[in-house]
Image: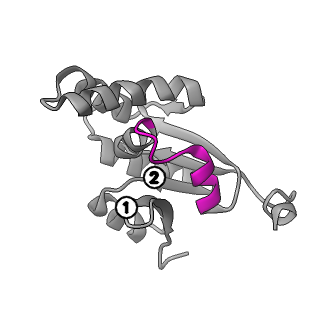
Amino acid sequence: MEAHRMGASERVALVLLDSNTLILMARGLAAPSMIEEAVLAPVRLATTSTVVEELRRLAASSPRPSLRRAAAAALCLLDRLGVEVIEASGGVDADDSLEAAALKLKARGARIYVATSDRILRRRLRLHGIPSIYYRESSGRLEVEWSDAL
């Protein structure tokens, strides 16, 4: 199976990370290797500038100290993991920026996934045929939620 996973026909999957997934990674509950295992392909990680701003706000002013620390650690992970930051258009929230970026990248032919535990965002993505990756607490694993449109 390893030869098939890394074969020449396999494209790199682009995975857009939501703030909750980055926080899970900072807390040690998720890792890039778990994302690769979930999508059965090598991955390139990205997020939007709006997600980065959301993490900065949480790190600076969350009323929960544990969330402040986790958000700060998530910001450090961006550089360490080489996460690409995609500029989002002004005036949109993090979920809207992820959806817009995913749609744009899908239209360009990218093999795109969005890693988020946000059920509403996952539902919106499913309507566009974009699979999402989420953390299933009961198994401690990342799972892919495939779209009916795929």
Q: Secondary structure at mark 1?
A: loop
Q: Is 124 contained in the magenta span?
A: no
113 vs 97: above or below: below
Q: Please name the amino acid that badge 1 sits on.
A: Glu
Number of residues whose C-alpha sits closer than 10 Å to that of mark 1, classed few (under 14), some (14–19) or many (20 or more)? few
Of the two numbered discs 2 and 1 on the same chain, state the one appearing first in sequence.
Answer: 2
- Read off the residue under disc 1: 137
Quadrant in the rendering for residue 27: top left
State which region is magenta: 26-38
Q: Is residue 127 left or right of residue 66?
A: right
Q: Is residue 54 left or right of residue 28?
A: left
17 vs 103: above or below: above
Q: Say which residue appears at 50% left-offset and 30% top-offset.
A: 85
Number of the label disc, if any, that sits on residue 72: none
Q: Nearer the viewer, residue 114 or 3?
A: 3
All told, the count of numbered labels is 2
Q: Nearer the viewer, residue 78 or 121?
A: 78
Q: Is residue 48 visible?
A: yes
- Magenta residues, dominant SS class: helix
Number of the label disc, if any, that sits on residue 115: 2
Image location of residue 44, percent across then percent down: 63, 42
Image location of residue 93, percent across then percent down: 26, 40
Q: Say which residue appears at 47% left-offset and 53% top-offset.
A: 114
